[in-house]
Every structure is written in structure tokens, then in C-alpha cells.
Amino acid sequence: MFSSIIKRDGRTQGFHESKITDAIVKCLQAVGEEDRQRAVELMLEVIKKIKLQYGKDSFTVENVQDIVETVLIEQGLVKAAKAYILYRENRSRLREARSELMNAVSLILQETNRDNANVGNSPSAKVLQISEIASKNYYLKRVLPEKEANAHICGDIYIHDLSWYGKTMTCLQIPLDRLLRDGFNNGHGYIRPPKGIKTAASLAAIILQSNQNDMHGGQSFAYFDRDMAAYVEIEKIKQEKLLRENLIELGLEADEKKLKKLVYDLTREETFQAMEGFIYNLNTMHSRAGAQVPFSSINFGTDTSEAGRLVCECFLLAYEKGLGKGESPLFPNLCFKLKEGVNFEEGDPNYDLFRLSMRVACKRLFPTYSFQDSSFNKPYRDEEVAYMGCRTRVISNCNGPEITNNRGNLSFTTINLPRIGIRAMHCGEKDVSLFWKYLDGVFDICVEQLLTRYNVQKNLKVKDFPFLMGQKLYLDSEDLGFNDTIEKAVRHGTLSIGFIGLAECLTALTGKHHGESAEAQALGVAIVSHMRRRCDEAVNKYNLNFSLLATPAEQLSGKFTKLDVERYGVIKGVTDKSWYTNSFHVPVEYRINALKKIEIEGVYHKYCNAGHISYVELQSAPENNLEAYESLIRAMAESDMGYAAVNFPVDICKKCGFNGVINEDKCPKCGGMEISRVRRITGYLSTVDRFNDSKLDEMNNRQVHYRIDR
């Protein structure tokens, strides 16, 4: 009799006849023919065939299972044979899933992956990522239709935040004014309205943290200066009351002019302290079981009231000051809203705050800038358009009021544009007609996938979102009860189709990208405008807010490339780097005039109504050349951009707080060896040590965009 058998992983273990018998019994049970004795007889037939086929040679588990199938069929047990084949397939899937999961867990236990630069290497971060891996496997293998799952696995599309697929939505513009005015409950009791600016700022941070725990994406305030201004006014009244009471107690007469100045100075100091505390909180308060700080964004700059201006000024000054040793804060993302007649031209009431914002940005990389007067914002003249730091934009609405507050993105899926270009190139002489056919096919899968996901999301219940829905943050959630589904609310959210690698796609089709060729640029605009038209068609067909997104490709940066190299090999200008270029951007390694880059990319913003961003790369912080910096911002506005930023290296010594470009491994000021290198990634800031390998390669290949005057 046999003593051993070779397992699937190559290990040798003892051979047991009973295992064959048990497997056959299960198959007979499955077809209603349970008979242990019959199973033993069949097992003996299997043993005979093993002896005949292998003799004393080694054999594997797979060899034995093949023989079991043969014996069942030869004995006329066709149904049992089918049950056995199904049993093998299920066991194989289970082993595959378990193996993939265990391999992923093993890697995470060594070090958390760097798909998300905001997640550190803490124990809670590891637990979060292990649960996400398990969740992702579950959705791919048990929930998604096979067509959609396969499109994601093979790399035609990418379903973002797949581990959160059926649990929650992406992001929200939070109605801060209402929560502070009416109070709220974050699960441990009612929080009453604040009585001063410090408390208001502390509660604002808690609100961002609380809602982050209910969602997987960014959290934002659309009108931070306006919403906080009311508490500056309360603070001012409180300070004046205290001063007058003290003067009465001392038996002194008030000098009204001096009193007024002192009240303002005390209010300003309290406001600065409140803003400083707010920034400190958002860089230290963790969400998601302690795995990361909230993805927070603050939109501001257009409130012209004295209190609103004070919030804006103190917020910028506190951000400029930095953290304890002068380090650059990574959060929140500051989005400064620019608007003609408010702050964009000299003489506007808030122009001085625009100037201050640029001074801060020249040191800290933030603020980024949103242009309220862009052509595609004109339909919303009565509503300011706010952004999430990553670039997400929510405003149009086929199901209700076109507003920013109380709404967000539900989910998004990205198209692998370079692959479609490669397929068209491989099937003909760079056949653009084939490209359009393939693009529409992949686009249809994206629409189907987003609808599948929406049908899961809409059936979640209010009780699944204790803060988001429990505190009625989403539009039309006011009348929903604890056990109601959330469809009435989330129909106001957006379903976004994103894209990556327009540059590489154009190179595959024409031999050049849009930074090199006017012909390629024309084709690029045609491709992106076509996808936008398809989104608009989906809006009309399904009465849901489909929109086009210039994908923030952090974790996706190298995943598509790796899959395409495996399938098509290395193609010059297309798959010969470890990353695909972000959305519609000109490739980072291509040397180009800053103003030319702005001109080329500006035309794409109006098509990407779900979000967009463009950058200019500088060699170092332009702290001593504010006029040049302002000229870049104005060029972005003139090119009809919606959202943009200027990048440069920010290196910080952890020992003494020195900020600047540190080319060596030690600080030029104190000689310290611990250097934090802050760079922008997908709209947010992070330290280089948290970038994944593809993003590191991309960052190291970024070319400075030199300036040539018009």
C-alpha cells in the first residue's frame, strides 16, 4: 500500500485511503445516493488505478483526484462525477483565495502597503489593511458580476476602494454651519452649540473625524470662513462683556476707542489660537481605528465680513507658522477660492488675503486654488463650487438642487486608456476607429459597474451610518428613519468614471503625446470630450449623476502599467516606465515651459466635471518672488482651469525645524540627520517615505517647468 502523497505545495505527507472515501461519500450525498459501502468499493477501484498508473512512483493529490473522476464516470455515476468536479473547483477557489489572502497578510504584517500615503505602519493600520484585503477578495469572488470582476482583475478598469464596495460611499461636503448652530451627536451624547471660536474650531475637527469614520474618502467644509465667522462674532461679544465687567469691578470708565481696539486684539488672538488648535487636531486626531488622520479639506477665501476675513487671515497665519518645530502641516488641504470682485484683483475687499495665501503657499505648498469664474462654473453663479483636496468636485444634480453642501461622490471607477490605445495599435496601423470601439466597450462596463455598486449602496440603511445619516448630513436625509434605506439621499451623490494615462494612450495611437504634438492634443481633447458626452448620456438614461473624473492615480499609478507590460511587453513611450501619467497631464518627465503646460492642460478641465487638477513644478519655494507665483495662478485662471496648484520640494529637519531644499542627508543648519521630505501626491501632501514605488519613480522623474515670458 502507498505510504505518502505529494501535496499541491510540494510537501510530502502520509497517504490515507479514508480521505478518498470521504470525498466520494460527499459526492454521492450531493446527488442523493449516500452509500458508505459503495464509496469504499469505488475507493478500491481508485487504488487499483493508482497502482496500475504509478506503481511505486510518486504521485500528487491532483493525480488522485483525476483518477477519482475517471472511476466515477466509468461506473456510470455521471451526476456524482459532476458533483465531484464542482467540489474540486470550489476547493480550488477556496485554496486560491486563502493563499492570496495569506500572502497579502504576510506582507502587511512585515510592513503596511503604500497604496495610501496617509496610512502609516502602526498596528491598527496593519489590522485595517488585512481586513481590506479580505473584504476585497470577498467582493471580487462573491458579489461582483463575473464580467465586472474580470475587467478589474485583468486591468481594463479599476474599481476604487473595492474593500469598501458595499459598506459606504466616498466623500462629503459637510454642512458645518448647521452642525455648529444646532449641535450634534457623534455617538456618545449630544454636543451643544459652541459659545466661542476655540470650541467651534475644536468641534469642527471632531465633525471631520466623526464623518471620516462613516466614509472611505475625503471630508470637506465648503464655506469654512463663512461658517466660523458667527463664532468670531460671539467671541467678540464675549470679550467686550468681560472687559466691561472688569472695568466696572475696578471702578474705571471705559475709553471706547481703546476698548474697541482691545476687544479686536483679544478676539484676534483667540481666533488665531483656535485656528492653530484646529490644524494641530487635524494632524493628530486619528480615524478608522487609529490607522490614519482624516482626509480633510477646507474651502475658504470669499467671506468679506470682518469676522470671516479674520478667520481666513488667522487660519493662513497659523498654517504658515506650522507645527511645533515649524514642520509643514500635511492636513487639512487648503483650497482658496478665487473670485473676481471679491479677492482676485487689486482693490477687491479680500485681495490682501489672496496675497497672504500666496505667501503661505510659497512656503507650505498649500493653499491650492479653485477658480470660481471658470466657464463651466457660470451656470452656478449663486453657488460657490468647492473641492476635495484630491480634486473631487460635486455641483450639478439631476435629482435636486445644484449645490455643493450636503453632497459628495458615491464611488468611482477608472478606465485604463493606454491599454485601449495599445489594443488599437496592435490590431491595425494605429487604427483610431478601433480605438473608439474599444473605448465605448470599456466605458459601458464602467457604467454597468457603477450601477451595480449603486444598487448595493442605495439599500444600505440609516443605521449603518450613525453620523453621516444619523445626523442628517446628506441632502434629503432629514425625513429618513433609523431603519430606512438611504436611496432618497444618495441619489444626489455622483457616480464618477475616471481615466488615467491619456499621454501614453496618445503615444500608442500617434507616436507622440499632447505635450509634443498639436495633432495629439486635438485627439486627446476628442477622447476626453467623448467620455464626457457618454457620461451625460448616462445621466439622461439612468437619472443618476454620472460624471467624468481626472483620476487621482496614487495606488493605481503602477498597477495598470505592470499588467500591461505582462500582456504587451515594453513599448517605448507607453509601457517603458513604472507608472502611467496622471489623468490628462503632460508627462512629468517631459521638459516644457510652465505657461505652455498650463495652456495644454487647461482645456481638459471643463470636461472633467467630477474633478480635475493641474500642477506646475518649480525647483524650489518661490518665497522671494511672489509676483512670478501670482502670474502662474493668473495664467491658470486665463486657461479656464477649475483647480490648480504649484509644486516644489519642501524638506524639513525634524530636529530644528529648518525648511527648504535639503539636497544632502543632513540639515545645513543643525546637522540633524532626520529629514522629512514633503511632496504633493494626488492633491494631498505626504512624506516621501510613504509613497509607493511607482509614485517614487514618478516623483524622481519630475522635471521643473521652466518659465518663459510671453
Image (cartoon, grey):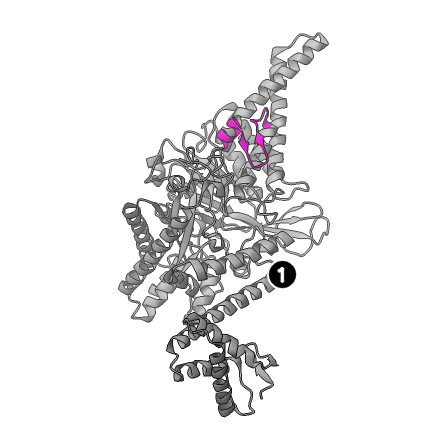
In this rendering, would 603 be left or right of 555?
left
In the image, is residue 212 above or below residue 133? above
The N terminus: image quadrant: bottom right
The residue drawn where x is 44% and y is 32% is 345
Q: Is residue 579 visible?
A: yes
Where is residue 482? Give x, y as percent.
46, 38
Q: Which residue is mark 1?
A: 109
Q: Quadrant of residue 4?
A: bottom right
Which element type, helix, strand or loop, lies under badge 1?
Answer: helix
Q: Is residue 512 visible?
A: no
In the image, is residue 483 above or below residue 664? above
Where is residue 698? Give x, y as percent.
51, 59
Q: Amino acid at mark 1?
A: Leu
Residue 186 sits inside the magenta stretch: yes
Residue 529 sits inside the magenta stretch: no
In the image, is residue 21 above or below residue 218? below
Q: Characterize the local packing of mark 1: few (<14), some (14-19) or many (20 or more) Cα atoms within 10 angstroms.
A: some
In the image, is residue 456 above or below residue 383? below
Q: Nearer the viewer, residue 152 or 226?
A: 152
Magenta span of residues: 175-197
The residue drawn where x is 59% and y is 40% is 282
Where is residue 23? Give x, y as percent.
50, 75
Where is residue 451? Give x, y as percent.
36, 51
Q: Nearer the viewer, residue 413 or 327?
A: 413
Count of marks overlaid on the render: 1
